[in-house]
Image: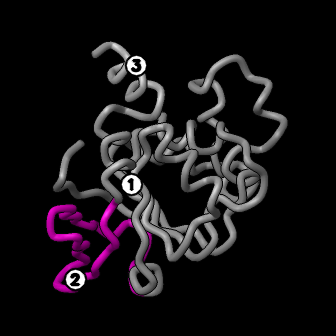
Amino acid sequence: MRKEFAGRVWRLGDDIDTDIIIPTQYLALETVEDMKKYVFNPLRPDLAELIRPGDIIVAGKNFGCGSSREQAAEILAALKLSCIIAKSYARIFYRNAFNNGLLLLENNELYDLCQEGDDLSVNLENRQVLLGERSFSVASVPDDLWQMLEAGGLVPLMRKRNAQ
């Protein structure tokens, strides 16, 4: 996992629930690759086509609320986002994201000051996000979750540990 990266911002609001991330009717599709075409469909049907690997979602509070469906985090990880930065996360989504190798960061100010299309630079060593000349701090990722990210998620981490 890279400790420094930059990406383009996609800005979403508060209370983005798992039904918005991936609506129920698309969960029956055969693969995550099939499902990811419909990410955020109820909110912004065009967004799935616009998101590129390395992009960053910046959101308000309570991102990932709603059901405990793991596919929501799995699909966002499959989009190869650099990370999501939100004011706060639903607890189950937070853990599901790390289980699937998706980096989540928290900051209370960035959402209110950034615009969609802005470029952000993230330095995890310094726990800083740069938006132009402004710097924002983010909480550090706990060691156990960082190990999970570096392995690509919980299952790859457990395979690695059990092979030793």
Which of the 4 image quadrants contains residue 110?
bottom left
Residue type marked 2: Ser
Please determine whether, in this image, residue 75 is positioned above or below residue 145: above
The residue depicted at 43 percent of the width and 45 percent of the height is 102
Q: Position of residue 109 (x, y in %)?
A: 41, 86
Cα separation, mark 1 vs mark 3, equals 24 Å
Say whether residue 10 is magenta. Answer: no
Residue type marked 1: Cys
Closer to the camera: disc 1 or disc 3?
Answer: 3
Q: Which residue is mark 3?
A: 159
Q: Secondary structure at mark 3?
A: helix
Looking at this view, name the residue that lies furthest to the top.
163
The residue depicted at 70 percent of the width and 17 percent of the height is 30
Q: Position of residue 99 (x, y in %)?
A: 50, 40
Cα separation, mark 1 vs mark 2, equals 17 Å
Q: Which residues are magenta?
A: 113-141
Cα separation, mark 2 vs mark 3, equals 38 Å
| Upstream in sequence: badge 2 or badge 3 | 2
Q: Residues within 10 Å of mark 2 (few under 14, many from 20)?
A: some
User: Which numbered marker is on residue 135?
Assistant: 2
Residue type marked 3: Arg
Q: Which residue is mark 1?
A: 83
